[in-house]
Image (cartoon, grey):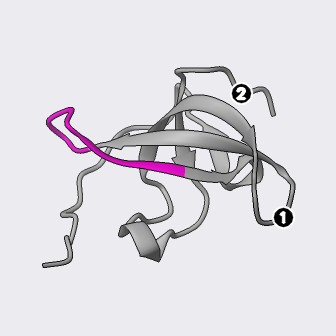
């Protein structure tokens, strides 16, 4: 899988600690060594529907997939912790 900086990707699994779900879209902003399992990792910035940054997360590279031209966006409500 060829990933490039600043491309949009989507998650292939849930990240409940950030209230993120499989299929959520993020922007890849850096590549790093993931601290827990030493797999190459990605730093992602997640934005809400208005373009406001809501999370920056580090995850293994294998947890993201580049967007394709045959995919469309959808909207869901983010349940924020109070």
Query: Residue at coordinates 50% horizontally, 51% vertically from top-left?
Result: 57
The quarter in which the C terminus is drawn is bottom left
Label 2 sits on residue: 3
Residue segment shown in magenta:
48-57
Residue for badge 1: 37
Classify 10 Å Cα crowding around label 1: few (below 14), some (14-19), many (20 and above).
few
Quarter-of-image position of residue 28:
top right
SS at badge 1 = loop
The spot of residue 46 in percent (x, y) is 38, 44
| Image position of 69 with respect to 47: above or below | above
Residue 52, placed above or below residue 21: above
Q: Please identify the residue farthest to the front as the structure is shown.
A: 35
**Disc 1 and disc 2 in contact, CB within 8 angstroms:** no
SS category of the residue bearing label 2 = loop
Question: As drawn, which residue projects farthest toward the right?
Answer: 38
Specify whether residue 73 is painted magenta: no
Task: Identify the residue at horizontal 52%, vertical 21% (top origin).
Answer: 6
Instruction: Point out the frontmost of discs 1 and 2.
Output: 1
4 or 39: nearer the eye? Answer: 39
Which of the 4 quarters of the picture holds residue 1? top right
Q: Is residue 74 left or right of residue 18?
A: left
Mark nearer the N terminus (1 vs 2): 2
Q: Can you tell which quarter of the image residue 26 is in?
A: top left
- Rate crowding at label 2 as few (under 14), some (14 to 19) or many (20 or more) other CA atoms within 10 Å: some
Q: Residue at x 61, y 58 (%)?
A: 12
């Amino acid at each position: 899988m060829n990933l490039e900086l600043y491309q949009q990707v989507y998650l292939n699994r849930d990240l409940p600690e950030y209230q993120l779900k499989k299929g959520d879209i993020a922007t890849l902003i850096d590549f790093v060594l993931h601290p827990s399992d030493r797999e190459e990792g990605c730093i992602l910035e997640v934005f809400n529907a208005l373009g406001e940054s809501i999370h920056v997360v580090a995850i293994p590279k294998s947890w993201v997939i580049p967007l394709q031209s045959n995919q469309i966006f959808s909207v869901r409500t983010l349940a924020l912790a109070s």
